[in-house]
Image: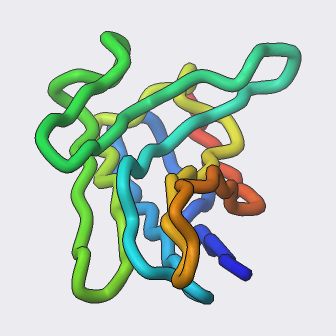
């Protein structure tokens, strides 16, 4: 029905930058809230940044370093990550609330994740 595909992960040294992309495709009528989550080894998945139709929020640890954005015309979402730290190392997941064509309800979808590794 809907696929979310992340790209742009990789390995970078502390202080470096990466830009993650999330491409949404499938039977999409509309995208509501979209966000980036991450999960480090041995830790719970946490919200990193989220874009609703009217607001943006970030976890405190990335404020001033990460920027979330979206291109609604292309069903794309991005996460620009600057001044990366070793503690940012995690698998990053794209999440979206999707209104399927022909449906009256929003459904939550996840991507498969992309690894970000920051070395000191």
For this orientation, the residue located farthest to the right is 42
Above or below, comparing residue 88 to residue 68 in the picture: above
Question: Residue 31: image x %, image y %?
Answer: 39, 65
Question: Residue 43: image x %, image y %?
Answer: 78, 14
Q: In percent of the image, x 52 and y 51: which residue is there?
A: 12
Left or right: 10 in relation to 31:
right
How many discs appear? 0
Left or right: 108 in relation to 112:
left
Q: Quadrant of residue 60?
A: top left
Front residue of 88/1: it is: 1
Question: Residue 113: image x %, image y %?
Answer: 71, 56
Q: Quadrant of residue 82?
A: top left
Left or right: 17 in relation to 120:
left
Above or below, comparing residue 10 to residue 50 in the picture: below
> What's the image's color scheme?
rainbow
Q: In percent of the image, x 70 and y 52: which residue is there?
A: 115
Q: In percent of the image, x 62 and y 34: which residue is there?
A: 38
Quadrant where the image shows the C terminus? top right
Q: In percent of the image, x 44 and y 69: which residue is there?
A: 21
Quadrant where the image shows the N terminus? bottom right
Left or right: 92 in relation to 54:
right
Question: Residue 10: image x %, image y %?
Answer: 61, 60
């Amino acid at each position: 029905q809907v696929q979310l595909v992340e790209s742009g992960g990789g390995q970078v040294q502390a202080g470096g930058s990466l830009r993650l992309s999330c491409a949404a495709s499938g039977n999409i009528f509309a995208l509501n809230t979209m966000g980036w989550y991450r999960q480090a080894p041995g830790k719970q998945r946490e919200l990193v940044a989220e874009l609703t139709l009217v607001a943006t929020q970030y976890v405190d640890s990335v404020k001033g370093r990460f920027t979330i954005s979206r291109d609604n015309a292309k069903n794309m979402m991005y996460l620009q990550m600057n001044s990366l730290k070793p503690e940012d190392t995690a698998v990053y997941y794209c999440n979206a609330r999707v209104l399927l064509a022909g449906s009256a309800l929003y459904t939550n979808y996840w991507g498969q994740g992309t690894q970000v590794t920051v070395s000191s």
